[in-house]
């Protein structure tokens, strides 16, 4: 679970119901499905780390029942899974799990979902201490 906490994926105490997106954003039908990350970026002042470039894997499954599963794999650390609920508005995707909410600005272009601007924690300078970061993710629908 250590790696999940780094990324802020361990979710919220509050479960959110799925809210249908309005006319200017992706529909629920467009969001539901399995998404594989091509970029998982953690940004802190003066540094950005793309975990995918270092061999990490991430899969996000958004269920039609308002639940999500994130599976993260890190070289040398194995795979971890996080579950919770998700909701979407016109341009915001919220993932809610046991540690809180992660709110991303989102855009959908074809089969590419771009999520940006969520607050999280990650040890970007590899000093053993998690740093506050902004999390950006690019995913492709399977």
Image: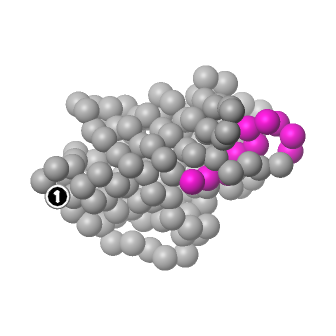
Q: Quadrant of the C terminus?
A: top left
Whether residue 29 is visible to the viewer of this picture, yes or no, is no
Question: What x and y, as percent, mark residue 71?
Answer: 55, 45
Question: What x and y, as percent, mark residue 96?
Answer: 48, 65
Residue at far left of view: 23
Question: What x and y, as percent, mark residue 36?
Answer: 44, 34
Rendered residue at 24%/55% (across/down)? 90
Q: Is residue 127 magenta?
A: yes
| Residue range (magenta) | 119-128
Residue at far front of view: 45
Rendered residue at 30%/66% (across/down)? 18
Nearer to us in this view, 16 or 60: 16
Would residue 39 be found to the left or right of residue 108 on screen? right
Question: What x and y, as percent, mark residue 15?
Answer: 44, 74
Q: Is residue 51 magenta?
A: no
Q: What is the chief secondary structure element of the magenta stretch?
A: loop
Rendered residue at 61%/23% (across/down)? 53
* The quarter of the displayed image where residue 75 is located: top right
Q: Say which residue label 1 marks.
A: 22
């Amino acid at each position: 679970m250590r790696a999940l906490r780094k990324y802020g994926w361990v979710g919220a105490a509050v479960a959110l119901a799925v809210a249908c997106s309005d006319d200017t954003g992706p529909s629920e039908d467009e969001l539901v499905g399995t998404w594989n990350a091509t970029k998982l970026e953690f940004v802190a002042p003066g540094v950005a780390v793309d975990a995918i470039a270092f061999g990490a894997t991430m899969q996000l499954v958004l269920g039609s029942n308002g639940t999500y599963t994130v599976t993260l794999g890190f070289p040398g650390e194995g795979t971890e899974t996080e579950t919770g609920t998700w909701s979407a508005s016109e341009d915001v995707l919220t993932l809610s799990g046991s540690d809180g909410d992660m709110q991303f600005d989102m855009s959908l272009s074809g089969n590419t979902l771009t999520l940006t601007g969520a607050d999280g924690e990650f040890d970007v300078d590899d000093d053993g201490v998690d740093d506050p970061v902004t999390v950006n993710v690019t995913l492709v629908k399977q």
